Amino acid sequence: MDKLAVREAVWRALDQVAVPDSRFHRDYTMFIPDFAGSDQAVAQLTAHPYYRQAATLFITPDNCLEKLRWQTLRDGKKLIVTTEAGLRGLFLLDPAQIKPEDYRYAACLDGQERMGRPISLREIQATLNQLDLLVTGASVVNAQGIRFGKGHGYFDVEWAVFYAAGLVKQTTPVFAVVHDCQVAEIELEPDEYDTVMDAIFTPTRTLEIASAQKPTTGVIWEKLKPGRSQENLVLRELRQWPR
């Protein structure tokens, strides 16, 4: 299967409902956009028992998840976010340490680093213990919960890092938020590093995936692009841990 061809077909449909990015306009190779109806998708997600039970979430910096990050703070949950490509590591957004009137700004990409504070994997281990729920966007996802993003592999690496650090386990739920047009009727075989979704939320429906498999390989260092483990602060921290 040609993933690029599938992405491009979905992007053509997505172009009818997507919200342009302030920097990348409609270049979907550079970002995962917000879209018409994302608030309905988020409302379904926040009604889910896994979200209700979660105290600490990891939510990717995708544009379609800004409303979710805002709602997470309003619901009093701690939020771990990553910077673009992990170049500046991870940040903690703690609603107890942010003024409520600043929650919306904290939820956007420009605000998260100003309103939050840097946090290491070690500190997450020591103070938060684990991540209760992970949420990501996607370029394409199928009904079996297999997703792929822009082509950089960021989310699968993030899962691998958290798994290697003991912050997630195979039973940790993982959700995706997408537009209906991003749910493609395609057959995919997950690679060893693919993180399969437990549920997919669109503006019109929720797809639950039974027995979603999560990778247990940790970071496959030899598959990373040259220099990535040094550029990404989280990978750099993990690589320095004793084996």
Image (cartoon, rainbow, N blue to C red):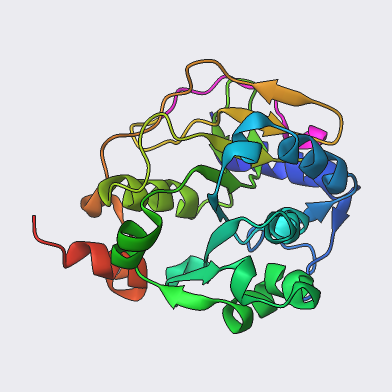
| Residue at (48% x, 67% y) in the render | 85
Left or right: 14 with respect to 60? right
- Does the image show residue 48? yes
On screen, 179 above or below 106?
above
Residue 204, by quadrant, is: top right
> Residue 122 location in percent, x, y?
28, 64
Left or right: 222 with respect to 171? left
> Residue 35 location in percent, x, y?
84, 51
Magenta: main secondary structure: loop
138 is within the stretch colored magenta:
no
- Does the image show residue 83? no
Left or right: 144 with respect to 31? left
Left or right: 121 with respect to 85? left
On screen, 42 above or below 96?
above
| Residue at (49% x, 43% y) in the render | 132
Q: Which residues are magenta?
A: 179-190
Looking at the image, which is closer to me, 196 or 90? 90
Looking at the image, which is closer to me, 96 or 49? 96
180 is within the stretch colored magenta:
yes
Looking at the image, which is closer to me, 141 or 187? 141
Q: Residue furthest top?
A: 210
> Residue 100 location in percent, x, y?
76, 72
Residue 215, by quadrant, is: top left
Q: Residue furthest front?
A: 96
Quarter of the image where the C terminus is located: bottom left
Number of callouts: 0
> Residue 88 location in percent, x, y?
44, 77
Q: Residue furthest left?
A: 243
Residue 98, by quadrant, is: bottom right
